[in-house]
Image: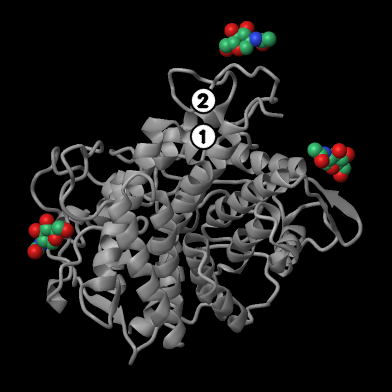
Amino acid sequence: MLVFCLFFIVLPKKMSKRFSKVDNNKTQCNVQASKPCPGTHSFQSYPYSIARSQQRSGRLPPDQKITWRSNSGLTDGSSANVNLTGGYYDAGDNVKFGFPMAFTTTMLSWSITEYGTRMGPQQLDNARAAVRWATDYLLKASTATAGKLYVGVGDPNADHQCWERPEDMDTPRTVYSVSPANPGSDVAGETAAALAAASLVFRAADRAYSRELLMVAKMVMKFAMEYQGKYSDSLGPHDEQLWGASWLLRATNDKTYIRDIQSLGANEDTDIFSWDNKLAGARVLLSRRTLVDKDNSFDSFRIQAENFICKVLPNSPSSTTPYTPGGLMYKMSSSNLQYVTSITFLLSTYAKYMISSNHTFNCNNNIMVTSKSLRTLAKKQVDYILGENPLKMSYMVGFGTKFPQRVHHRGSSMPSLASHPSGIGCQAGFEYLHSNGPNPNMLTGAVIGGPDQNDAFLDDRTDYQHSEPATYINAPLVGSLAYLVGSYGSG
Ligand SMILES: *[C@@H]1O[C@H](CO)[C@@H](O)[C@H](O)[C@H]1NC(C)=O
Ligand SMILES: *[C@@H]1O[C@H](CO)[C@@H](O)[C@H](O)[C@H]1NC(C)=O
Ligand SMILES: *[C@@H]1O[C@H](CO)[C@@H](O)[C@H](O)[C@H]1NC(C)=O
């Protein structure tokens, strides 16, 4: 219940490579498997990180690569007389939570926007397809009923009381929505961010789709600003509106969004970044205007972004971030790697922005921070996730020689429809949750919650805090890997 805990507590309330030393060999190594960069884990793990088609809901396309999954959720939305098929299951369960799905989409889109050219054409296509599977759904959720944003399908309580394959689901597919009478400016802000960020992904590749995404993003953002009110009790007042407005500013350059950003006054300090708190992400994104576009009117966001980074660096006087003895950033006992991948993305991306203006900064007039120091920390976190840690365990399923075998994921832990065509009921499935055997279906590429504060990991399927994957753990990792792989050899 990684997510169970998070979502039970937060959402349903109102629902009522390892890089071996970078050498200076500038041979054109890239992320295509045909031209591996020697000695890099991340190079090899990179394509895995994008492969998340195991989480797809709806009618699967003919080119679906994961054959242990089949169509599911084909009547999603029918209880509200709308069509809400498609999108992604969130984690190890079969619920479509719109809030983290939108965050996943924003982070995957940000990864492509910053690092798409480093991905190589094949992986870029895969990454765009992964975004589109989400945005097709988010467009439906935003436009199916005028004045409503659908924010989830599937009763999480009922779902979590069963251990069922998505293909067998028989729990209530309750539809949740926000509207002017029942506002949710936080989930609307995140959805607007996702659609605006995705519009950048498709700007050259599919202009008509990109325009549609941007048009709907503007509409959803308007809703987020006009009907203030929170869908969840998540922390961070206005953080999603700031995030949504920042993405719309990036996608449109329309000064209206500068006014929105200023009106929000979202000035709290932060030392975290995740689907539940976007302040740091918005500040890094806005810093781009100062560092890359040389527009000094955004300098206050640069200062806030650097304040965040000083709270994360291990050697900074203002650091509030613990590290495990093995060197992993350790933010929370449950699903810690979601914070690691999200924050690592910000470190990588801030490093990239710093390079473009040869920028450095200080933490508390004490330590000097360079793009290189941020990249070194980002690389260390990624290396740890991929197996450079005391247990020599890769936390990415299917990658490396030792990786988790008993992942907390219903479909992966149960026999597939092909091997067991008859249905497995709600309670009957628990035999698979509690079995000691390895998961029969490999959840290739999924990154799970990760080790505890002492670098220990039990590989126990019932231990959801450490063994459950989630789409929003993977999405930011795609960008960090592309950055690290792409900067191989560039010093
Ligand atoms: C650079 O890499 C290429 C291809 O991996 C290899 O053939 C070559 O010997 C390397 N050169 C140096 C100087 O390491
Ligand atoms: C829902 O929409 C999809 C396309 O997004 C379509 O293929 C499917 O047939 C529709 N389902 C229903 C029940 O209308
Ligand atoms: C970058 O900054 C460093 C010191 O901060 C300076 O020595 C160097 O010349 C600068 N490089 C460029 C290209 O401006």
Residue at the (37%, 49%) spot, across then down: 202
- What is the spatial separation of the Cα atoms under label 2 and label 1, in whole angstroms? 7 Å
Q: Is residue 133 above or below residue 231?
A: above
| Residue 88 quadrant | bottom left
- What's the residue type where badge 2 is placed? Asn
Residue 52, how many percent across, how many down? 35, 45
Left or right: where 118 falls relative to 414: right
The residue wearing badge 1 is: 118
Mark carried by residue 30: 2
Q: In this view, does 146 lie above or below 110?
A: below
- Looking at the image, the residue that sits furthest to the bottom is 181
Residue neighbourhood size for the residue with mark 1, other residues' Cα within 10 Å, grouped as few (<14), some (14–19), many (≥20):
many
Residue at the (52%, 41%) spot, across then down: 115
Residue 315, how many percent across, how many down? 82, 52
- What's the residue type where badge 1 is placed? Arg
Q: Quadrant of the C terminus?
A: top right
Determine contact: label 2, label 1, CB under 8 Å: yes
